[in-house]
Image: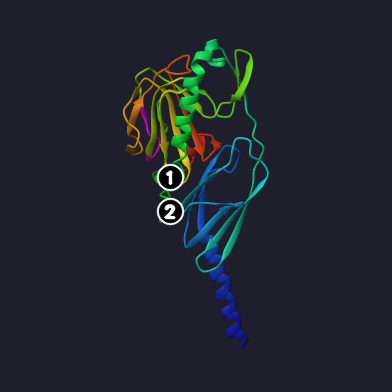
Amino acid sequence: MIRKNLLILIFIIFSVSLITAQSYKIYGKAEPGNILIGKAEGVKEIFLDNTKLQVDKNGFFVFGFDRDAKGTHSLLFKYQKGKEEIKKIKLPKRNYVVQKLKIAEKYVTPPKEELERIESESQQMKNARSEVGKIEEAFFSNGFILPSKGRISGVFGSQRVLNGVPKNPHNGIDIAANEGDPVYAATDGIVRIAGDNFYYNGNFVLLDHGQGLTSVYLHMCKLNVKTGDTVKRGDKIGEVGSTGRSTSAHLHWGVQWYGKRIDPMSLLSIKF
């Protein structure tokens, strides 16, 4: 009887350990401004703190932390067989640089005659982003590439000082390149908006990669896609330019998870 009970206990412990060890994997580094991608087996629901995450049919899910995020967060897994599991995530402090730039004064304080145009373009962006989060499929599961070859001339999170006036932090990276150089989709997605000569963004593309993850490509001289198109990782979506608020040919590449500001470089470090 003792032997039988001991065998049952060993079996239970082994089963729980097996489920815990193989129930999920998370790729990426947990820190402010970073994205993390996970894959879970037999999961029913996943919550980041009080936010329910989307999980696709293959078990892929994504979550991220804003540039200014801090503290400890909880990732709760609820499995189909009733088991629950909690992973605690403690974010370290992240320091950012100060970047001082000299640009045309009209881009620091836009002329009054441009305000109506800027407001209209802002509303178009809001309308496009209102569609984000409606796709459960993890288009990003194919991984990520750098969208353009060139020198990183602006880093994520840096405090922007334009002509001596402190502005919002830089919510992306800048890649200095030659005008006309190709710009590629960093991963699979749907074109939510292909913008034509916006005041700030110039010619740009906003891609929806599913589950609230988006990427934006600004200042291009030419677009090769239109709103509603579906693209694959590595597809050419445009060419490097200097349209909108720009002083030289470069690509601004920005990433968000819903409204959270994400460092695009954190995507490149993720390997499945």
| Residue 246 on the magenta segment | no
- How many circles with numbers are drawn on the protein? 2
Which residue is under mark 1? 210
Q: Which residues are magenta?
A: 183-189
Q: Is residue 160 left or right of residue 194?
A: right
Q: Which mark is residue 24?
A: none
Report the side of 129 relative to 225 (left or right).
Answer: right
Residue 132, visible in the rendered structure: yes
Quadrant of the rendered image containing residue 30:
top right
Q: Secondary structure at mark 2?
A: loop
Which image quadrant is residue 76 in? Answer: bottom right
Which secondary structure lies at badge 1? loop
The image position of residue 154, as x and y in percent, is 52, 23
Is the C-beta separation of discs 1 and 2 under 8 Å? yes
Q: Which residue is mark 2?
A: 56
- Residue 116 placement (x, y as % from top left): 49, 20
Up-down relation of residue 83 to residue 73 (above or below): below
Marks 1 and 2, the one that precedes in the sequence: 2
Q: Amino acid at mark 1?
A: Gly
Say which residue appears at 48% left-offset and 50% top-offset. Answer: 61
